[in-house]
């Protein structure tokens, strides 16, 4: 664990003061404006990005590492809280039922807001069920759970061929983020997954999922961040370093265009080639929120739910990269920390000031704070009082039935990352 920074409490108090309105943001307080720039995020070259990436991958290494799984098992078996309660909550869910039946489809068709919904819910929930059983196997070493996870993955791998309609990229991202979590645990913990079945699952991820997500999206930030989460996880399972480098590079460009810091200037950052080049175009994309503070998200004034999807994907990618010895927290951690604190403040009931989203926000952040809070507070020593209060009051974190699941169990106060 890293030593706690003596500056962390001061930074946190300033962040909290801004968030709750004790210190007004520059535009609201009449302070000197920050530089009037709207910088694009300049991506590293492929060669620069590749130089920072380890030559081999660590397994299991998507979302949770072997030491993290060992920690979870030890805490649950000792009956320690909050892990035991989180485990019991997971095991009481329908996803952990040994009679769970998957519903694979050759073509999953998902329109906007899942209309039509032809296999969308089935696919996402089956992926979560496979991951749930993989976690249950890791804790109990009961082969029934391993076999159930294997049976769910084996049901889909020879069947699924395509995702269609307008939400195909996002649907592929959500399911594609969860499948590798389950697959990594089962493949690399001696669960008895047959080599031919593993090969078929790899083929599914390589041919059906990765091409849909690897090139990202020019839609809302949560789309591309979720797509990069899927691409990163799939790349690790496939041991595909080139795909990992590509996803990592796109992720590092998107994060600064999703979460604002005052150092960005008076206009939020943008993604090169997005077609949002002028301040008016950029502010329209940010739902016309013109007063900017640390931690504001591109989707804050849309709603906290979609913002939470993006924050969750950021924390998941950073955590997975850290497991691989590729620490991205120095590049994204400050933005993630401010965003978690800013949104946690209002999610907990602080009155919304008139300068923020016209004085009204749509809440519903979801169970998305555990991973980032553990990494930034417990491992790096930053004081995060609002995030901590929301996280601890919401335990045990369950699932959003999309791509977030059981993160109190997997990441609450979990000190381990690397073997």
Image: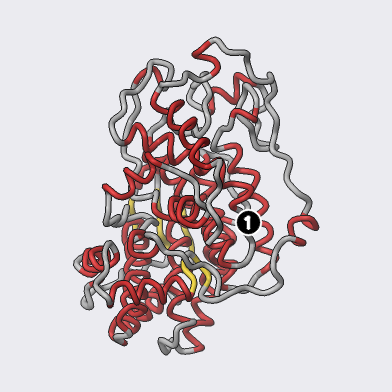
Q: Is residue 169 in view from this perspective?
A: no
| Coordinates of residue 266 in the picture (x, y in percent) | 62, 21
Mark 1 Cα shell of 10 Å, populated few (<14), some (14-19), many (≥20): many
Q: Above or below — where is 189 with respect to 38?
A: below
**335 and 60: which is toward the camera:** 335
Image check: 339 left or right of 104? Answer: right
Q: In which quarter of the image is residue 353?
A: top left
Q: Quadrant of the C terminus?
A: bottom right
Q: Which residue is drawn at 51% across and 75% down?
A: 60
Q: Which residue lies furthest to the front in this view?
A: 6
- In the image, is residue 169 above or below residue 184? above
On the image, the x and y values in percent for residue 26 come to 55, 17
Q: Which of 145 and 54 is in front in this view?
A: 54
Please tell me which residue lies in front, 250 or 197.
Answer: 250
Please tell me which residue is depicted at 56% across the width and 33% down the height of the picture.
Answer: 260
With 314 as the anchor, is 270 left or right in this view?
right
Q: Name the residue under label 1.
A: 247
Quick one: SS at disc 1? helix
Q: How is the image coloured?
A: secondary structure
Residue 263, image x, y percentages: 64, 30
Residue pictured at 53% horizontal, 51% vertical: 4
């Amino acid at each position: 664990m890293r030593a706690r920074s003596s500056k962390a409490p001061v930074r946190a108090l300033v962040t909290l003061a801004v968030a709750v309105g004790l210190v007004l943001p520059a535009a609201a307080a009449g302070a000197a404006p920050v530089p009037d720039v709207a910088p694009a995020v300049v991506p590293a070259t492929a060669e620069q990005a590749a130089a920072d990436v380890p030559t081999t991958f660590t397994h299991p290494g998507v979302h949770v590492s072997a030491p993290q799984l060992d920690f979870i098992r030890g805490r649950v078996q000792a009956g320690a809280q909050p892990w035991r309660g989180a485990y019991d909550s997971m095991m009481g869910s329908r996803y952990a039922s040994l009679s769970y039946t998957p519903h694979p489809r050759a073509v999953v068709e998902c329109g906007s807001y899942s209309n039509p919904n032809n296999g969308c819910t089935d696919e996402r929930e089956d992926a979560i069920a496979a991951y749930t059983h993989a976690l249950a196997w890791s804790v109990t070493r009961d082969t029934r759970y391993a076999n159930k996870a294997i049976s769910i993955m084996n049901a889909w791998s020879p069947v699924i061929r395509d995702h269609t309609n307008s939400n195909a990229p996002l649907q592929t991202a959500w399911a594609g983020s969860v499948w590798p979590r389950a697959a990594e645990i089962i493949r690399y913990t001696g669960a008895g997954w047959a080599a031919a079945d593993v090969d078929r699952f790899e083929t599914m991820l390589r041919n059906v999922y990765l091409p849909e997500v690897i090139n990202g999206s020019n839609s809302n930030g949560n789309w591309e961040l979720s797509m990069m989460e899927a691409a990163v996880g799939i790349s690790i399972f496939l041991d595909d370093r080139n795909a990992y480098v590509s996803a990592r590079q796109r992720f590092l460009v998107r994060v600064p265009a999703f979460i604002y810091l005052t150092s960005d200037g008076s206009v939020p950052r943008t993604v090169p080639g997005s077609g949002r080049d002028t301040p008016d175009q950029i502010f329209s994309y940010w739902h016309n929120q013109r007063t900017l503070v640390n931690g504001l998200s591109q989707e804050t004034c849309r709603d906290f739910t979609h913002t939470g999807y993006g924050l969750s994907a950021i924390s998941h990618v950073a955590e997975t990269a850290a497991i691989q010895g590729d620490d991205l927290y120095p590049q994204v951690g400050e933005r993630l920390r401010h965003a978690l604190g800013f949104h946690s403040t209002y999610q907990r009931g602080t009155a919304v000031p008139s300068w923020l989203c016209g004085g009204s926000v749509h809440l519903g952040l979801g169970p998305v704070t555990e991973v980032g809070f553990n990494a930034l507070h417990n491992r790096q020593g930053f004081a995060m009082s609002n995030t901590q209060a929301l996280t601890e009051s919401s335990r045990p974190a369950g699932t959003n039935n999309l791509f977030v699941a059981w993160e109190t169990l997997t990441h609450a106060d979990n000190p381990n990352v690397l073997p």
